[in-house]
Image (spheres, rainbow, N blue to C red):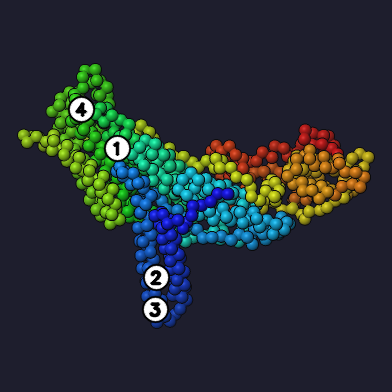
Amino acid sequence: SQQGCDPFAQTQRSKLQHRRARINQQINKEMRMRAGAENLFRATSNHKVKETVALELSYVNSNLQLLKEELEELNSSMDVYQNDSESISVPMIPLGLKETKELDLLVPLKDFISEHYGEEGVLFEKEIKEFMELRQAMRTPSRNEAGLELLMEYYNQLYFLDSRFFPPTKTLGVFFHWYDSLTGVPSHQRALAFEKGSVLFNLGALHTQIGARQDRASLPGLNQAIDAFQKAAGAFNYLKENFSNAPSLDMSAASLTMLVRLMVAQVQECVFEKMTLLRAQNDFLARLQLAQEAARVEDVYSLVHQTMNQPHVKDYVPFSWTTMVQVKSEHFKALSHYFAAIALCDCPAPSDAELLEQEKAFLQFHVTMPEGPSLRVLLQDPEERRKLGKAHLKKAIMKHEEAMRIHGLCKILRKMDILQEVLSFAHKRSLSKYSEIDHEEDFFETGEAPDIHPKTHQKPEIKSPNFSQVKVTDLFHRLGPLSVFSAKNKWYPARRVHLMRGENGFGFTLRGDSPVLIAGVIPGGCAAEAGLKEGDYIISVNGKDCKWSKHAEVVQLLKSTGKEGVDIGVITLQGSECPKAVDRKAAVMSSGPGMPKSNKENSRKSLMNSKSASTLLVWSKKSKRSKKSTYSGVPFTAVGDNEAMY
């Protein structure tokens, strides 16, 4: 069975998770104290008591503030998740996993099994413990493919748990506790949707950690980082589209929109880095392309920055993130002007053969046309190229300085030497280029360079989670086929019927398999006299469990009985007493698990868009059984395709 990584292995990351868990516990305690104090404050009319409680409240609130700041500093420890390579890569923003409390399902599930399924709960202890072990392991997934598969496996098991133990009308009575990944504020809900959503969130967060630790100085590392951030964006986007009314801020629509955009921006930054690795730097067109890629990165980061400054997100996002995003936006704007200048100043004027192609590229390069001579003249005149290049460098230097100024405002970022190094290296590079092309006898006023038109050769994709890649088997398989034995169906207590075979057989028609259905009972026949009814499901023959048996197996068991007859165990679904209802029921039964109304996972849209191959794992996809159990209006004595008389 799958295992989480050892939470006690003292790696830097697990120390981080320990500190997070400890702060979360303290926040929890303070929140309880605050709730108590607030209740007392409202309830008392005594002036003295009110004053004391008010003092206590302000104390608790300032404590909470400090704890949240400490947590923010932890969430900004981006270096813990970065790689150890020598080369300088700008740090990326990873997310910490949501923490959860342990959950004891032993008693609630055993009770449900005995009340709802009429089986002895104690016989299913092994399965319940296995499920709880899987949940325990899923709390500390390793930061690799195995960790991702573990979260997927648990998420897929929740489909079965939902179908078996969560009827649409009532809850199991257990609470799922999860902490907000950024503020550590605890939330709890009885709805299984909250558990599913939190696991999905952690799937996205784990992808961000895997993306942040890749060595982006190499092409394979860059491609893996791109893949990881695209999958993170996909997980957050899937969560946003399929769940609503989340009790914690990190899973609100506004936060998830921000996270999707942040991941897309990190993908775009990797694409830029990939271009710098792949392209020969000294070619005019390649440099124009780099400038446009950098402008594109600036564009997506400024969108993220706007999103982070929106009302419901602003007070929630760590200041270090907002600053980092703004720094990157300025930094890449500076780079776009730097590469424009390099293209103009370091590349020779075009030959006649190259002129047309360069003119065409340059025509779409700037947001507005640069002042001065026509493009053709500009491209062929080294002095004009130098002038425009100088204007671009001037703008680059201003933007580098702005990036460094913003970076200096955040004490957490100031501790990040790597970022500091990258910014100052880029700044110095632009300065030295400027002094190289600056002539003492320049009398012209350096003009205002127009901005560069953003353009990318690789658009980021939002890759939705592919749940069917991790196959799981229903741990509670022994309860019987889900089409009948699910939380939302109710049936009368099982009946044991002793049946003798008459001259014309048993006197009933059977249809389908797992479980086999009694489709018709001949009036006056043996089956009718023994008390079997249409719509009964055969669950055992002579004490042998037949819930999962195929049609032919049940028939074989019935045929092998001698004169002494046969004991048949049957159940009748409630509300299925007439044949028409049986089949309506069958069609309804096979439409997959019900979902709390508060979450949109059931919407037709998500069914239509789902490309997953596996019937079981797609939420609420129609199961294949429904085709078999459609009721033909033919009288039951006529033997249809898979309906036979015995």
Q: Residue furthest left?
A: 441
- Foreground mark, 3 or 2, reads 2
Name the amino acid type tagged 2.
Answer: Val
Q: Where is residue 358 in the image (x, y as percent from the top left)?
A: 25, 24
Amino acid on which disc 3 is placed: Thr
Disc 3 designates what residue? 52
Marks 2 and 1, how far apart in space? 46 Å
Q: Where is residue 638 in the image (x, y as percent from the top left)?
A: 83, 34
Q: Earlier in the sequence, mark 3 or mark 2?
A: 3
531 or 285, nearer to the observer: 285
User: How far is the residue under mark 4 from the one under mark 1?
Assistant: 19 Å
Residue annotated with mark 4: 347
Earlier-in-chain disc, 4 versus 2 = 2
Please state which of residues 95 and 173 is positioned toward the viewer in this rendering.
95
What's under tag 4, amino acid-wise?
Answer: Cys
Classify mark 2: residues with Cα within 10 Å, few (<14), some (14-19) or many (20+): many
Q: Between residues 501 and 484, which one lies in front from this camera angle?
A: 501
Which three-letter amino acid code belongs to the residue tagged 1? Answer: Ala
Q: Quadrant of the C terminus?
A: top right
